[in-house]
Amino acid sequence: MRAAAALTDNRRRSRLSVALVATVILAVGLLGPRTAGAQDDWEKLPDMPVEKWEAGTVVLDDKLYFFGGYTEGVRSSKLSHVYDPRENSWSQIQDLPSAITHMNMVLDGRTVWFAGGYKDGYKGHTIAEVWNYDIDGDRYTAAPLLPDTRGGGGLALVGRKLHYMGGVKADRDTDASDHWVLDLDEWARGNAQWTTVAPMPQPRNQFSCVTFDGKIYAIGGQFHHDSEQLDQARVDIYDPNTDTWTAGPPLPKGHSHAEGGTFVHGGRIYMAGGHTTKPGETKQVDGDILALSLGEQWEVVGTLPMPLSSPAAAIINDRFYVAGGSPGASKVQADMWVRRAP
């Protein structure tokens, strides 16, 4: 009797152990996908050749290009590089004509355009220079100057028209609403000049600027630069067909300093990092990745490995790359990471 009872007891314990193991396996299986989609799946890549923030960026041929920006000590740099994800390697390209920051880059075929910016360091002056860079020829060509000096404005290409808007004036603090257009076909024929179109509804600087669905989106930004730096949540959309501005979906918080981390991919606008001021809080460095689909509202789709101001970011072959940026206090870092695109 005792032997039979002991055998039955052992069988019960065995069945309980199997059930417990199965429960654990099931729990791990349920948690697995959440862990895979969490923000601890960033892979560290080799550092950038030179630490950078506020750099201009474009993507071409599945390669990420970096132009200028600030290096250690908040010094403007001429250095420019290209990163090839297939080779996981960096190559240096032709230096910028000047050491510039606070300029956006746009791609026209295999030519990169940029305009305005701050020249010669953190306390440098605003400029009216306009350049293009021939990627295949590895050379820069000067184009017609902006009508006035500007830093931290937006640059966008719609069709054959290059648009420059907003930014700060020569005192580095007064926001401009001016909106100028350069016809690139006329420039190619040698008789181009900037013309004036509808001004920004709300002048500001250091906003993200992209062309999306044939329209220009001016996203976030700040009021003033050398004084208050008041982050804004507003989004303004310019329609070149009607020369009018309309209000777009506002950001969930005031936001600026994400120009090099804002891009269009797969029918969405992505914006990574920057400065942010949430309602009732003080200005801080941001670690969120935001996305906007046409006709929708902004949503948080991921988190950076660390909060970063003015990093470079891009999606290449369904992989999300982020490099450089400032973790705060005008510091700069050279780290680079990659993860599955959110």
Image: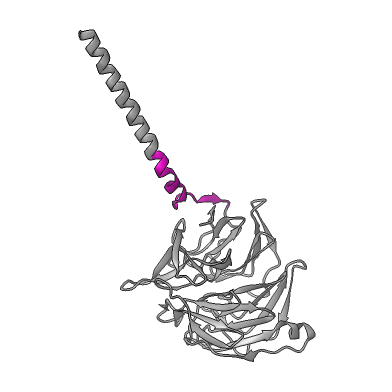
Q: Is 237 part of what is drawn in magenta?
A: no
**Depth check, front residue: 126 or 148:** 148
At a point 36% along the width and 30% down the height, the residue shown is: 21
At a point 57% along the width and 78% down the height, the residue shown is: 216
The span picked out in magenta is 28-46
At a point 58% along the width and 63% down the height, the residue shown is: 266
Q: Is residue 150 visible?
A: yes
Q: Position of residue 165 (x, y in %)?
A: 56, 84
Q: Is residue 70 visible?
A: no
Instruction: Establish if 35 lies above or below 274.
Output: above
Q: Position of residue 77 (x, y in %)?
A: 60, 69
At a point 48% along the width and 49% down the height, the residue shown is: 41
Quadrant where the N terminus lies?
Answer: top left
Q: Position of residue 309 (x, y in %)?
A: 47, 67
**Depth check, front residue: 132 or 86:** 86
Image quadrant where residue 6 sits:
top left
Farthest residue, direction left: 2
**Depth check, front residue: 84 or 201:** 201
**Depth check, front residue: 195 or 117:** 195
Counting every numbered tag in the picture gives: 0
